[in-house]
Image: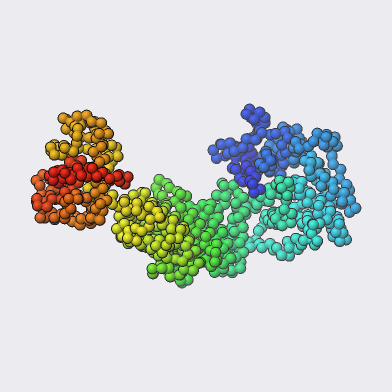
Amino acid sequence: MTDTRRRVKVYTLNEDRQWDDRGTGHVSSGYVERLKGMSLLVRAESDGSLLLESKINPNTAYQKQQDTLIVWSEAENYDLALSFQEKAGCDEIWEKICQVQGKDPSVDITQDLVDESEEERFDDMSSPGLELPSCELSRLEEIAELVASSLPSPLRREKLALALENEGYIKKLLELFHVCEDLENIEGLHHLYEIIKGIFLLNRTALFEVMFSEECIMDVIGCLEYDPALSQPRKHREFLTKTAKFKEVIPISDPELKQKIHQTYRVQYIQDMVLPTPSVFEENMLSTLHSFIFFNKVEIVGMLQEDEKFLTDLFAQLTDEATDEEKRQELVNFLKEFCAFSQTLQPQNRDAFFKTLSNMGILPALEVILGMDDTQVRSAATDIFSYLVEYNPSMVREFVMQEAQQNDDVSKKLTEQKITSKDILLINLIIEHMICDTDPELGGAVQLMGLLRTLVDPENMLATANKTEKTEFLGFFYKHCMHVLTAPLLANTTEDKPSKDDFQTAQLLALVLELLTFCVEHHTYHIKNYIINKDILRRVLVLMASKHAFLALCALRFKRKIIGLKDEFYNRYIMKSFLFEPVVKAFLNNGSRYNLMNSAIIEMFEFIRVEDIKSLTAHVIENYWKALEDVDYVQTFKGLKLRFEQQRERQDNPKLDSMRSILRNHRYRRDARTLEDEEEMWFNTDEDDMEDGEAVVSPSDKTKNDDDIMDPISKFMERKKLKESEEKEVLLKTNLSGRQSPSFKLSLSSGTKTNLTSQSSATNLPGSPGSPGSPGSPGSPGSVPKNTSQTAAITTKGGLVGLVDYPDDDEDDDEDEDKEDTLPLSKKAKFDS
């Protein structure tokens, strides 16, 4: 088993001057060939990976702090720290470092001499030590000058710190402080301010331990009240002794813990309130002060966590109905600060910390607190809840699901209090506090919405072999909680416009829509069933009529997210309920204004066009084309109309779809049946057999190049385009192949424009592909019956199927048109599928 003496935590100092935990492992020292020197190595206790590999540089300044800490800087802005579990392990590694640097292990710091000039280094090294003036009132100015002159030089700082430690000089200075105050010697007090401030900048843990001791810390704060830059001294001691009161909400039996709490609060006060804001050059000089506070907090959390009696009493009083509101508020504030301190713990310890709180019943306690009327208490409880959700959302989800399972039993116990089953669900309390936030800016609601989003996010849900958290929790959420979340939305959208349209209501509904939009994107069938069954989208689109543009855009974004899924269940629901109507109405009401609403609506229709969502395309054109056809500053709606017409044409003649791809590949397919002589007149040359995927022709056809093949096809396409543009308004509303096709268009020959007779009176040519009663014939869906007395001359080519128009084929070909009119009628009437 690895020696626990070498067990350490590795910390690095971030840009905010806060210590970040890099992990726990075991430290060793040894020669590393790559670094060419003795180095410190820390390997993670979890997987053995290398957490730290740092060469012991002879010129690097290492500091030993609080018996179990070693701190050093490897670069200008890169500080490292090793926190040892045991003092013995810290001493062993410190001896190794001192051995490499040639230092006596009894010192607590080694110094970097790189910044010293050669003359200064020689002068300093030649003197055995720094001799301090005697601590007398008359020599305070001399002492202040000595401290100020020593700060720029690392070696002189080291000698000054050693002299201050060895001679007990700080306590002597504090005695002079009392004398100066009694004599009202302001000049002396100003000198003492400069001296004490300079001692802080020495950045020495041993000096801090003296200054922050119980007997000295208030006098140190007193010295720092007399800033020469201020006309009147500050009253920090008065605040700490009279205003700031230590509230021991639960008696702390450990005197060491109590003293550590007092010390940490006062040192934090010195850092935040007493010391002047450090300059850029002084900032790194206070790194040890940051470290002192950080490790004190770690120690406090650890000591409280180990005190089982303390935590048991805390949660017992929190949940006790007999506890008065003032006492409960103090308990909640303590718990909030306790959780805030836990952020200094490393991940493993933090996990154990929250598990301890969970076992003690923190979530049921929060449920009681959130049910209180006191806004400040609820706010503190919300902050505690946010710590729990952000660190371990699965723990919160597991609790609320267990709570739902025990709902019946709990409801019976709470019947006398007239609390409904909905109220006892913690997550519903959170939703209700979000909805009922009285802050005009909804600051609390925004925070709670973020927590709800974290809880319903499938990305942080766990999955095991036997069950999935996603399935279980989302099933619970949509059954027990979703109706609470959507209640304000449904209550406000009963009419054609929002019943309440004030700014705060609009903000709240925007938050609800933001969460629902997130659910649409991540919850698939759960939210789909809810939206369709509860007709949520129709209610959301009522908000398109809001006077607040941001709310109308939230409603539009919700619908856009649904359409973006390209789910036919959603599409059928949208079409059945005519849910484009509010969008089109908002678009028309927006008029010619070029704003975000205009762009967002056009983008939605453009998405439908580009993605070719056929059902929605047909629905929009069939129901809203007249309202949109005059919009010509974008081509979106005309493009939708073109998509619709192409789609209808393919429905009427399915062969068009296959022919489109053939033509785009410069190929066409001949009819498999034997060509008649009249049909062969369309082609000037024969065609040879071609490979698979090429044109299918008879074996007698001869070779023909692709350009010759495509020439008659392109001419035919041009003629067909010309005919169709001339007769664009001709719509034949007739029963084709047993169904209605109101938008089906045919281009009739100019010499024989006539109405088609119904199929019941038509005499069909035997074997014709357009004959009714032959569903297997390829041309039946869009075929036209041939009548012996009235023959519709349909422009086509024998042996070609599924020719399609292209927008760029818009050249006229009068010569071909005239040529067509001279063709025999029998040929024109021929219609092959």
Q: Is residue 388 placed above or below 320 in the rendered structure?
A: above
Residue 74, picture quadrant = top right
Q: How many marks?
A: 0
Of residue 605 and residue 409, the one placed in the foreground of this image is 605
**What is the quadrant of the N terminus in the image?**
top right
Of residue 213 and residue 576, the one placed in the foreground of this image is 576
Specify how the rendered protein is coloured.
rainbow
Of residue 393 and residue 665, the one placed in the foreground of this image is 665
Q: Residue at 13% across / 43% down in the picture? A: 824
* Image side of residue 778 versus residue 595, left or right: left
Q: Residue at 75% across / 41% down in the picture? A: 108
Q: Position of residue 723 (x, y in %)?
A: 24, 49
Q: Can residue 492 be seen in the rendering of this structure?
A: no
Q: Position of residue 456 (x, y in %)?
A: 45, 55
* Image side of residue 257 versus residue 647, left or right: right
Q: Position of residue 343 (x, y in %)?
A: 60, 51
Of residue 67 and residue 229, the one placed in the foreground of this image is 229
Q: Residue at 75% across / 52% down in the picture? A: 212
Residue 667, picture quadrant = top left
Q: Can residue 114 be seen in the rendering of this structure?
A: yes
* Image side of residue 77 versus residue 358, left or right: right
**What is the quadrant of the C terminus in the image?**
top left
* Image side of residue 103 versus residue 731, left or right: right
- Residue with the most extreme right position: 138
Q: Residue at 63% across / 63% down in the picture? A: 249
Q: Position of residue 112 (x, y in %)?
A: 74, 37
